[in-house]
Amino acid sequence: MSPHAALTPDTLAPHASAAHAEHYDPVACKIGMWLFLFTEVLLFGTLFIVFAVYLTLHHFDFASGSRQLDKLLGAANTMILLTSSLTMALAIAAMQRSNRRLSVALLTATLLLGLAFLGIKAHEWHHKFEHDLYPRSATMLANPYGQQVFYGLYYTMTGLHALHVIVGCGAIVSAMVLIRLGRVRADRIAFIDNTGLYWHLVDAIWILLFPLFYLIG
Amino acid sequence: MTSIPAPLTPALPTYLDVRRGLVSWLTTTDHKRIGIMYLCGILFFFLFGAAMAVTFRLKLYSPGLHFISNETYNRLLTLHGVTMIFLVIIPSIPAIFGNFFLPIMLGARDVAFPRLNLMSWYCYMTGGLFALTSIAYGGPDTGWTFYVPYSLRTSGNVLLPILAAFILGWSSILTGLNFVTTVHRLRHPAMSWFRMPLFIWSLYATAWVQIIATPVIAITLVMVLLERFMGVALFDPSRGGDPVLFQHLFWTYSHPAVYIMILPAMGVVSEIIPTFSRKTIFGYKYIAFSSVAIASIGSLVWGHHMFTAGMSDYARVTFSFLTFLVAVPSAVKVFNWLATMYRGSIYLGPPMVFTLMFIFLFSIGGLTGLILGSLATNIHVHDTAFVPAHFHYTMFGGAMVVFFGAMHYWWPKMFGRMYHFGRAYASAVLFFIGFNLTYFPLFLAGVHGMPRRYADYLPEFTVYHRTSTIGSWIMVAALLLMIGNLIAALFNGKRIKDRNPWGGATLEWQTPSPPPPSNFTAPPDLSRGPYDYPVEVQDP
Amino acid sequence: MAAQHEKTHPPVPYSLYFKVWIALILLTVLTVSVSYANMQQARILTALMIAAVKILLVVLYFMHIRFERLLYTYMIIVVIVTYGIFVSLTFSDYLYR
């Protein structure tokens, strides 16, 4: 056994990092989360640039492509996600007031709304697949160029977005577990706070996706 | 070197020997150990990338050589680029020296997110593994730029190197995220923004570029994979796509990437020159703001890689103008460094020799960048050998030479051992000769019309290529000598017990060599600024 | 050095979130109704402007930027401006070919 065993890092230095159990820096956690959100903004932002460029180059085809999407389903999904953002924000507000029961109930509501969103999205995709409108399908390859790219972007962007919704749902479940374990509390709120930030960003991205894909026809 | 004097206080464990064994390293969250683990990976991939280059340069020794096929040449060239850019130069200074010294220079105990830091390293190694594995499938042959539509259709392996680049991107992003948060939250209370070392300023500016620019290439590469493997119409012109759009998005990251490479290097130079001139840095605030300016403007010049691709005149003029503009803050830095040296008490230790070499080589690279940045001359030299000559002078003669200098500067601090000076100087001189022999002829060949990325050439270019190939041998010999010297120092280099062999004024020179796990044995003394000389030098 | 207990602002009242939500729903209804009108070019611009307002509401209130320290606001501005320049420079090519 090393004679220096007693000289652990903890005994030598008074202040530690944000990840250390006893020294919890919620501001560092929030800064880190926002920085991560910035990468998501640029990630989807790049896709929006691609959309904008092809919208400029294939204006007519994009409009006709948009008309092939179900406006009302898209609007319903928008309402669902907006409401889930509300329940998410309320869940955090409840946790700030140490109302664990309410917080978990609101998180559950958020989760269910998120799953509903995914359900509708899956239904939309399935509908398109049934009409032979998937990448590389015969119908797709016979489409005008602009529409092919429209659908290429549709699947890429809504697919990537749905992936983020799934990850968000996972984060919500984790938050609920951590609340149950007492690891997320009013004075230790960073995890659920950051989950909320992520969820709201996913909502914000959809707010932009919806009109661009569904309403330009 | 005789007997080591007995220490006056009981020796604390250093970060190297507290908890031993491979597992303790692979599960560490100590930023210093993570820096060393990056060092191992980066040195390995550097030698691997160099080996590929030496090999394909052999084919160019004479025109008409076929012991390496043209296809193999393309694959070696591509993997050389992917390796050097994503696995070596981009991580080099931030991941090794940034990780090791950013917290210490700030007076902190570690970075803001130590576990995320470890994850960065695993991302790096995974990306490296994917890149190596692609060789088993023949490797990519698209050039490191993966231009569409060729990358959508080539039979060469594209999946693994693109996945490698994607994963490596996340390693870079996480490092940047960690550094920004650390600078904001873990600075010593007495250290205001303008009392930070300039190395930190450069790492901070770089970190923002890493965060903002890297996701662009991440998603762009994902789009290439989606199109290649699932037929999602995104870039293929036969499906309505625009290949130039790929170029826009690719270079929106890949140009700032070169600033991710050079800014930390310039930060290191801003540390070494004042220390080895025993004189405070000239124009601290100008250098700090120049770092921010280079990061900002440098993120907006990507179109200069596409002047002949078919962009509008309006775009080309704008990008050319911005390209000229970004040279200004770089020049400000060079002048400030020279002004720092003027009337200083200059000590030409090995770190300083590499730094001076950097100024010379980077200046050549920078000036030739103006030729490339000006629209009319660009048309003549675009896609010729002039381009690789330019970027090797800036990325290799620039960033990597500073990397060498940084190794020689901080090796005694990281390992408590001093290397052999004579061999260090010899390797520097040999490298300088080899480097210029390798790359200068390529400028001339390019101006005379030699295209880049060509596996063969017309006989009139022989003298240029042959000189370059011979130069590459000299350069490799120098690198082996240099790295061998540093590694030998780990085993039989002179142990230095002293904290400050160079007389530096930043906080890492107040810690023991090597530092203890918690970085400081006593609260750091911030009574003097980071460039407040003279500092008591303890000779090695 | 890292403050253990940041000066936490008093929790945002639940009712404020409901008000923002109502605004968002109304704006969504507005966006959809506008899309039925025959406006061609202006349609996309209008849709984008309404979307921008909605996103602003989400960022300011749901994501708390209205109540947080200014650092986050500055960072967001830097990112948005940079992204805006990316878009502008890219379109300096596509709009003038």
Image (cartoon, rainbow, N blue to C red):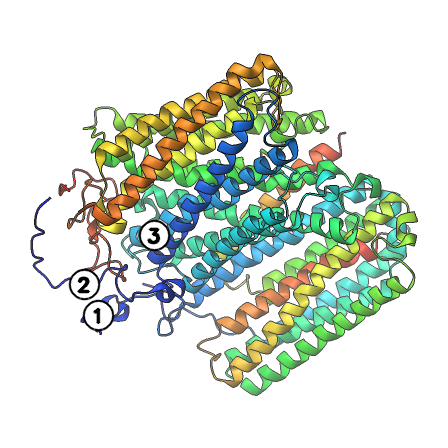
Asked if marks 3 and 2 touch (Cβ < 8 Å), the reply is no
Amino acid of disc 3: Phe
Q: Are marks 1 and 2 on the same chain?
A: no
**Residue C80 seen from this side:** no
Residue A43 on image: x %, y %? 63, 52
* Residue at which label 1 appears: A7
At 58% from the left edge and 42% from the top edge, which residue is drawn?
B253
Image quarter where the C terminus of chain B lies is top left
At 92% from the left edge and 48% from the top edge, which residue is drawn?
A142
Quadrant location of residue B114? Answer: bottom left
Between B387 and B191, the one nearer to me in the picture = B387
At 29% from the left edge and 42% from the top edge, which residue is drawn?
B486
Between disc 3 and disc 2, whose residue precedes? Answer: 2
SS class, disc 1: loop
Quadrant location of residue A157? Answer: bottom right
Chain for numbered disc 2: B
Q: Are marks 3 and 1 on the same chain?
A: no
Q: Residues within 10 Å of mark 2 (few under 14, many from 20)?
A: some
SS class, disc 2: loop
Q: CA distance from mark 3 to mark 1?
A: 21 Å
Q: Is residue B63 above or below residue B348?
A: above
* Residue at which label 2 appears: B12
At 45% from the left edge and 76% from the top edge, which residue is drawn?
A188
* Residue at which label 3 appears: B100
Chain for numbered disc 1: A
SS class, disc 3: helix
Could you tell whether A25 is left or right of A46 in the image?
A: left
Q: Residues within 10 Å of mark 3 (few under 14, many from 20)?
A: many
Residue B321 on image: x %, y %? 58, 26
Between B262 and B153, the one nearer to me in the picture = B153
